[in-house]
Amino acid sequence: MSWLTDLLDVYGRVLRRAVDLTLKHWWLGLIAIAYLGAFGALLIVAMPFGLVGGFLLGFGMAALISSWLVLVDQVVRNGRVTLAEIPGSFVVYLFDVITFLFVRSLLSWAANIAFGDDSYAGIVADLALFVFLNAAPEQIYLARNSGLAVFVESYRFIGTYWIEWLPINVLLAVLFRAVIDVPVIGVALVLAAIVLTFGFIARGLLFLQLTTSSRRAREFARRTAG
C-alpha cells in the first residue's frame, strides 16, 4: 500500500501549506467576492444587448478568471501576492481563457447535438468533459499551455494522476456545495469565498507536487528524512 502512504503524505503536506497560505492571504476571499459582484453587474448590463452582450459577458468573465489565476499563481509558486499584481492581471491569460471557454462550449454543444433527447448520454458526456478538463486552470497558469494544448494536457494529466487528483477535488466540491447552502446569504458568500480560495491554492500545490516529482522520488525522500 505504498501508493496510499504516498497519497496521504502528499495530501497532508499540500493541505497544511494551503491552510497557511489561505490564512496569510485571507483578503483573496474579498477579491473573489468582488469579482463575483463585478460579473453580476456585467451580466445585468450585457443582458439587453443580445449577441453583442453575450460577447461582452464572455470577454469580461475571461478577464476576471485571468486575474484570479494570476493571483493564485503568485501564491502557489512564490508563497505571496500583493494588490499591485491586480491591475495587469486581467490580460495575462485573457485569450487563453477565452479560447478554453469557446472550445469547451463547442464540445458541450456538439455533445448535446450528438445525443439529442438521450438525457442520460448527455449527462455522461458532460461528466466526462468535467472530469477530463478538471485540471484545465492549472494547465493554463502553471503549465503555461494554451489553445488546444490545454485540453490535450488536461486529459493526459487526469489519465496519469486521477487517483491523486480526483478524491481531493471531490471533497472540495462537496465542501463548496455545503457552504453555499448555508441559509444566511452573507455567511454563505463569505464561506464560499474562503473555500474557493483554499481550493484553488490546494489544487495548484497538488498539481506542482504531482508534476515535479515522482512517487518513487517522494518515497526515497521520506526514507532519507527518516
Image (cartoon, helix red, strand yellow):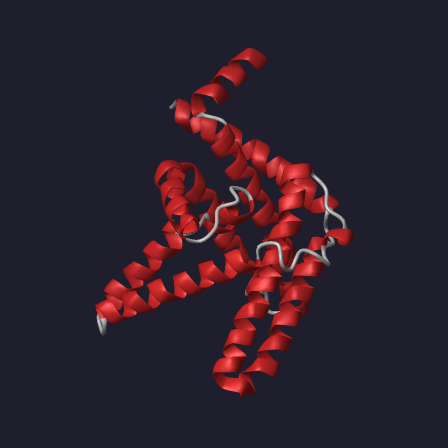
Residue 202 coordinates in the image, percent (x, y):
57, 43
The residue that appears at 52% across and 28% down in the rendered structure is 9
The quadrant the N terminus occupies is top left
Tell me if residue 184 can be seen. Answer: no
Would residue 214 be found to the left or right of residue 122 on screen? right
Q: In this view, does 70 lie above or below 161?
A: below
Tell me if residue 80 can be seen. Answer: yes
The residue that appears at 53% across and 38% down in the rendered structure is 206
Residue 31 coordinates in the image, percent (x, y):
70, 59
Q: Is residue 59 above or below residue 67?
A: below
Would residue 202 be found to the left or right of residue 131 on screen? right
* Quadrant of res 158: top left
The residue that appears at 54% across and 83% down in the rendered structure is 47
The residue that appears at 56% across and 75% down in the rendered structure is 56
Residue 55 coordinates in the image, percent (x, y):
51, 75
Residue 141 coordinates in the image, percent (x, y):
56, 47
* Quadrant of res 38: bottom right
Would residue 153 be found to the left or right of residue 57 on screen? left
The quadrant the C terminus occupies is top right
Q: Nearer the viewer, residue 72 or 141?
A: 141
Number of numbered markers? 0
**Name of the residue lying farthest toward the bottom:** 48
Q: Which of 141 and 27 is in front in this view?
A: 141
